[in-house]
Image: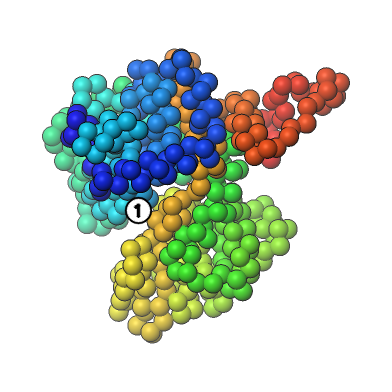
Amino acid sequence: TRNGIDFAVADLGLAEFGRKEIRLAEHEMPGLMALRREYSEVYPLRGARVSGSLHMTVQTAVLIETLVSLGAEVRWASCNIFSTQDHAAAAVVVGPHGTPEEPKGVPCFAWKGETLEEYWWCTEKMLTWDGEGPNMILDDGGDATMLVHKGTEFEKAGVVPSPDDNDPDEWKVFLGLLKESLAADTGKWTKIGEGVLGVTEETTTGVLRLYQLAAAGELLFPAINVNDAVTKSKFDNRYGIRHSLIDGINRGTDVLIGGKVAVVCGYGDVGKGAAESLAGQGARVIVTEIDPICALQAAMDGYQVKSLESVLPEADIIITTTGNKDVVMVEHMAKMKHQAIVGNIGHFDNELDMAGLARYPGIVRNNIKPQVDEWVFPSGRSIIVLSEGRLLNLGNATGHPSFVMSNSFSNQVIAQVELFTKHEEYDKEVFRLPKKLDEKVAKIHLEALGGELTKLTKEQAEYIDVDVEGPYKPDHYRY
Ligand code: NAI
């Protein structure tokens, strides 16, 4: 704690560099800046205590300071052990008007290269306020929401979790933290769960968890699915990945992508961006899919569709984008070409069988540099694994660029305002933002790019049965 601000970051001395990048990012985030102007005298988030769990990057710093400028108090942690940009974390703690000696920003608990224990410690700190708890959660991947739900569940059942050696590491560490916190303060998680008015969720994987909780009747508060705003998933997941996938591969390996065979597992929004990213560099892209519709899309886009097993002997680069588990197993890895590059860009590392790799008889791990490991099989052949299987665009590079994140985060801010100001209108279910707001976010960004929108005439609007001012599409339209 310094100057009354609680924090755990790598080095507050990096704040000046962070501030410079935040200043440049603000210009590239017209959606967030427009929301700051729109609400400059209204402070719709006054009284909101937002606990945020989302990659602590420069772009997220602009999001955090937008929430603050709308009146919110904020505490933050990253949602991944490798994704924090230490200068951005320092800058949010110091704030625009503070100094490292006298920080005036936001409590933040995040640094690049946390252990799993540290990760869950940071998540708990971010949810632990002096006095009253948080009343809003902003989540990416659902870990903060899961901690509150699991904590409440254990408290209600009156049992203390007992981590088991057979549990996967991630789960064991999570239960270990819960065990300690339950021993220290019974009732903590139930109180937090009762105080939270709503959660806004950033990504596909977190949204899946929310729908599962809602279906089981276990969701403790209303949720807005930000991911499925069109201006989020059809932009961030796709065009963001198109930019940041090759950024991660390049910074991690600097291997020429042109002419190589690149396999993309999954052809959803992220997979489409990934395939385009690699094809743009001249790679020959092959897609694996389980869904015939997405597989056919891949074929129509000019990519070969194959099973993973059949392409292993020729693949130079293998990237998972499925949001599923056990997609590339150690048996696959053992059959790959020498120095094949293996990485995941989906939310969790369980797409790759990292546990199986570490246990493989005779395997040797040779760390090349942070977030780049060569794993050598007894045959002498090796593979290069990026970010230990965690999302490589944020682990090996700096994630998506500001402009695309401005789309995503504008939806986040709108969703926070909506749930905080109108929570009594929402049941404990998962909702999406109205299309009109999606169109508003798109319009701001289109104008920032100098795009010129065609205006409907009244007659045309009547003919296609929409309002001149939108929304322009029915909800079932797929873009
Ligand atoms: P999506 O649901 O649109 O796409 C996933 C695709 O994978 C689907 O088409 C599905 O049929 C396919 N799939 C599932 N299991 C498969 C398997 N075993 N083999 C081959 N294909 C399989 O989801 P979206 O939006 O593309 O997100 C994917 C993941 O990326 C999620 O975990 C999401 O949270 C994450 N994400 C990561 C970002 C980043 O910056 N790294 C940005 C946005 C999303």
Q: Which residue lies furthest to the left in this view?
A: 184
Label 1 residue SS: loop
Identify the residue at image location x=26%, y=24%. 133
Return the x and y of residue 118 as percentages of the image width and height: 23, 48
Identify the residue at image location x=23%, y=42%. 8
Colour style of the rendered protein structure: rainbow
Choose top left, top right, bottom left or bottom right for residue 182: top left
Quadrant where the image shows the N terminus: top left
- Mark 1 near ligand 1 (CB under 8 Å)? no
**Drawn side of residue 149 relative to residue 296, left or right:** left
Return the x and y of residue 154 as percentages of the image width and height: 24, 35
Determine whether 298 is above or below 307 in the image.
Answer: above
Pointer 1: what residue?
82
Quadrant where the image shows the C terminus: top right
Identify the residue at image location x=53%, y=40%. 28
Return the x and y of residue 350 as percentages of the image width and height: 40, 56
Determine whether 100 is above or below 324 in the image.
Answer: above
Identify the residue at image location x=51%, y=23%. 37
Question: Is 185 in front, or is 236?
Answer: 236
For disc 1, the neighbor class at 10 Å (few under 14, some 14 to 19, many from 20) is many
Question: Is 9 in front, or is 395?
Answer: 9
Question: Is 241 in front, or is 163?
Answer: 241
Determine whether 229 is above or below 254 in the image.
Answer: above
Specify the amino acid type for callout 1: Phe
Choose top left, top right, bottom left or bottom right for residue 374: bottom left
